[in-house]
Amino acid sequence: MAIGTAGAIIAGSVITAGGAYAASKSASNAQSKQARRAEDRANALSAEMDELELARQEIINPYDDVVSLEDMIIDNSGILSNPFENLGVATQAAKFQAEEADIALANTLDLLAATGASAGGATALAQAALQSKRGVSQSLELQEAQNDKLAAQGEQFLQQQQMSEAQRVQQAQMTEAQRIQQADVLGREFVYGEKERRETEQLNRLQAQITGQQQVSTAARQNAANIMSSGISGSTQILGSGIQGAAMNFGGFTPQVTPVNTLTSQGIVPVGGGITPTAPVYTGSDIRLKKNIKLIGRSNSGLKIYSFEYIDKKHGSHTYQGVMSNEVPKEAVIKGNDGYDLVDYSKLDVEFKRI
């Protein structure tokens, strides 16, 4: 009778523990699927980001179309002239004056000859005529000097006007050409800058989405591990209680229970047979197991965070993030069956992960 009761108790415990384990396994699988979906989405976003990176515009030189403005300079000074350049001497009036003097002299000589005047009077008259012609010549020289002066003044004025016009034309054309070139440069800079800003915003949005999916994946996998750990722990407690109850009904005899997991430097390693009494998932964090150790930061509580690789690839063949077992609180560290330290990261504010 006692054997039958004990068997029933054990059978019931096994069924209950199995149900609890199955439920935990199902929930864990759901979390794992969510993690895989998030990873697939992150990978797709990464591919999209790579395509966007490859399609980004090339860096431009907004000044590469700027050319010399020398050919645009036109000199309009040739349209000006010297208004005093063609001034002439008033020779006609002087000619009339000389002719009048000659006529007057001839009339006087005729009169002297008709009246029988002496030769001395004729000589005096000739001298007076010569003096009159000298006055005419002097008048012509004064007109020529005045004309030369006016021509020089006109030439000076012309040169000043030509220089002023040339400078005005050059300044106006250079200013306009520079304005057009500067507008072109600013326009190209604006277009490039706006496109660069939009592309950068797209990259930032994609990176934020990738990071979000990675966080979802990490959280889902952590939840899956926690669910399985809790399920195993709960099943162990149920089955353990059933065995103890059966033992009490069987007269105090307690059968030996072999743990389902054995703690080694690789973490919790399944060996089969029995139930594990251990809920936390431990990770090999002994410094003797690691190489290429680099300090990469500190946690909020001040724990040092390292990147490292395992010497023996059976522990993992990638680069990981974590702590050194000799630098964390002792309550988070246990000794594995193979003599190496294991760390329970659930008791730390540091995430163990592959990087």
Image: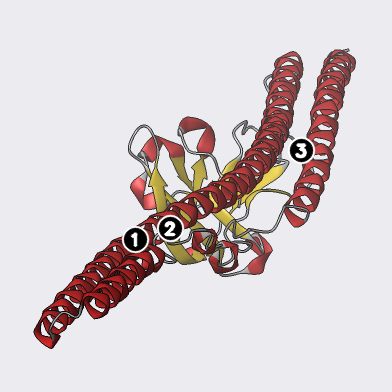
Mark nearer the N terminus (1 vs 2):
2
Give the residue drawn at x 82%, y 18%. 13
Residue mark closest to the camera, 3 vs 1: 1
Give residue 86's mark.
none
Give residue 154's mark.
1
Give the residue drawn at x 45%, y 59%. 166
Give the residue drawn at x 68%, y 21%. 237
Image quarter where the N terminus lies is: top right
Kind of residue at badge 3: Gly
Q: Is residue 284 visible?
A: no
Is residue 283 placed above or below 114 in the rendered structure? above
Kind of residue at badge 1: Gly
Q: Is residue 64 visible?
A: yes
Q: Position of residue 158 (x, y in %)?
A: 38, 60
Is residue 318 placed above or below 354 in the rendered structure? below
Mark nearer the N terminus (3 vs 1):
1
The residues bearing labels 3 and 1 have C-alpha atoms spaced at a distance of 124 Å
Residue mark closest to the camera, 2 vs 3: 2
What crowding class fits label 2: few (fewer than 14 Cα within 10 Å), some (14-19), or many (20 or more)? few
Q: Nearer the viewer, residue 267 or 62?
A: 62
